[in-house]
Image (tube, helix red, strand yellow):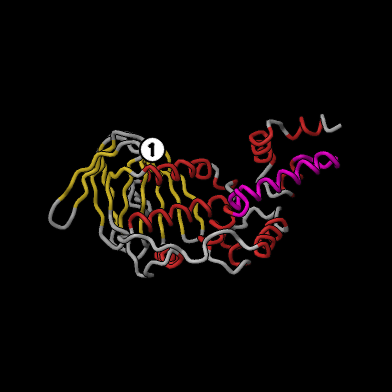
C-alpha cells in the first residue's frame, strides 16, 4: 500500500483532509477500520508534528531505539514529535486526528517573537491532556472540511495561536514577556484598520500582511489589536465585510453572489452563513425588508 507524507497507508483512511497555510500544514486523518496498522516516517528536516485525537479508544505502541511504549488516547489527547527522529508506531483501534505540521522556519520565527532562542526545539509528548490545543484543533475542522472556502486570515490566526501555545508549553523554559505589549497607538491602529478596509474583497489577506504593514511582529500586533478593539483582526474584518454587504443589499440590485465575492466572502453560501450567525437574517430576507 502507498503511504502518505505522514506515514499513513492512504487506502486505509476514511478522512484525508489537508490545508496548507504558509509555513504550516493542517490535516485531518482518520481510519476506516479497526485493523492493526503501522505508521512509519524516516527522519527529515520538516520540523514538528502535533496531533489531537478527536475520539477515544485509540492506542499506539511507539518504538524507540532500545524499547517501545504503549499509549492510550482519549478525546482531546495530544502528541508532539520531532521529524528529525525516525518514527515507527503500531496503531490499534480506530483513530481520528487533527494534525499540525510546523516547519522549522515557523518555530524559529515564533520563538524569536516570544523572546525565546531561535534554536528552540519542542519536546516530545504522547497521549498528553492539553485542553488548549484540543480546543484550537476543533476550531480548524470547518476549514479542513472546506479548504477552498477557508478564510486565510482566520486560518493564519489559528496557526499563530497554535504555534505560540506549543512554543510556550513545550519549549522547555518559561516564555519571556514580549516588550511593547499593550494597545496599539491611535496612528498604528488607524493604519491597520485602513489596510484591512482597503482589502475587504481580498480573501487571502493574512495577519502577517497587516502586521508587516504596521512594522510589528505578528504576535505583538494580534494581541495589541485585540486589546485596542476588543476583537481579533479576523472578527473586525468580518464585521466590516458584513456592513458593506448589507449596504449593497440595501442600495443596489446586484446579485447576491456578486455582492458576496465583492465583499471578500468565498461565495453566496459563505455570506449567508455569516450574516445569519451575526444578525439572524439571510441576504434575501434583508433585501426584501429593506424598505
The 10 Å Cα crowd at callout 1, few under 14, some 14 to 19, many 20 or more, is many
Q: Answer with the quarter of the image where residue 14 lies.
A: top left
Residue 250: percent from the left, percent from the top? 83, 39
Q: Is residue 210 magenta?
A: no
Q: Quadrant of residue 194?
A: bottom right
**Is 264 on the left or on the right of 137, as rendered?**
right
- Left or right: 60 in relation to 119: left
Against 137, is 21 above or below? below
Side of 130 where 251 appears, left or right? right
Could you tell me which residue is drawn at 31 percent across and 61 percent down? 173
Magenta highlight on residue 240: yes
Q: Is residue 83 visible?
A: no
Query: Residue 202, image x and y in percent?
Result: 67, 55
Would you say 287 lies left or right of 38 here?
Answer: right
Which element carries disc 1, helix, strand or loop? loop
Which region of the structure is painted magenta?
228-256
Q: Which residue lies at the image location 34% right of the left edge and 60% below the top edge?
A: 174
Relative to 270, is 200 above or below? below
- Residue shown at 29% from the left, 63% from the top: 84
**Nearest the eye: 224 or 273:** 224
Q: Is most of the magenta stretch helix, strand or loop? A: helix
Residue 175's image quarter?
A: bottom left
Residue indicated by mark 1:
54
Q: Position of residue 114 (x, y in %)?
A: 43, 63
Residue 6 is situated, as x and y percent measured from the top left of the image, at 35, 52
Which one is nearer the viewer's eye here, 219 or 107? 219
Amino acid at each position: 500500500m502507498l503511504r502518505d507524507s505522514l506515514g499513513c497507508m492512504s487506502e486505509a483512511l476514511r478522512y484525508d483532509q489537508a490545508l496548507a497555510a504558509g509555513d504550516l500544514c493542517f490535516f485531518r486523518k482518520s481510519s476506516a477500520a479497526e485493523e492493526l496498522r503501522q505508521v512509519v516516517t524516516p527522519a527529515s528536516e520538516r520540523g514538528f508534528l502535533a496531533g489531537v485525537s478527536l475520539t477515544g479508544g485509540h492506542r499506539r505502541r511507539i518504538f524507540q531505539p532500545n524499547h517501545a511504549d504503549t499509549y492510550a488516547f482519549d478525546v482531546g489527547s495530544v502528541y508532539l514529535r520531532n521529524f528529525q527522529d525516525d518514527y515507527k508506531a503500531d496503531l490499534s483501534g480506530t483513530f481520528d486526528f487533527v494534525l499540525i505540521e510546523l516547519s522549522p522556519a515557523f518555530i524559529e520565527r515564533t520563538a524569536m517573537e516570544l523572546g525565546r532562542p531561535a534554536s528552540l526545539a519542542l519536546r516530545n509528548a504522547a497521549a498528553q491532556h492539553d485542553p488548549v490545543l484540543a480546543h484550537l484543533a476543533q476550531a480548524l475542522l470547518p476549514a479542513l472540511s472546506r479548504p477552498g472556502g477557508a478564510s486565510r486570515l482566520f486560518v493564519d490566526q489559528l496557526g499563530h495561536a497554535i504555534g505560540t501555545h506549543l512554543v510556550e508549553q513545550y519549549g522547555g523554559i518559561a516564555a519571556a514577556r514580549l516588550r511593547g505589549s499593550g494597545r496599539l497607538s491611535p496612528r498604528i491602529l488607524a493604519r491597520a484598520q485602513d489596510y484591512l478596509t482597503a482589502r475587504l474583497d481580498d480573501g487571502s489577506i493574512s495577519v502577517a500582511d497587516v502586521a508587516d504593514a504596521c512594522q510589528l511582529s505578528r504576535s505583538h500586533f494580534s494581541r495589541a489589536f485585540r486589546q485596542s478593539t476588543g476583537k481579533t483582526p479576523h472578527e473586525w474584518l468580518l464585521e466590516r465585510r458584513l456592513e458593506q454587504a448589507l449596504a449593497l443589499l440595501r442600495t443596489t440590485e446586484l446579485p447576491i453572489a456578486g455582492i458576496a465575492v465583492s465583499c471578500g466572502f468565498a461565495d453566496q453560501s459563505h455570506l449567508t452563513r455569516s450574516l445569519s450567525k451575526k444578525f439572524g437574517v439571510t441576504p434575501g430576507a434583508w433585501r426584501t425588508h429593506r424598505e
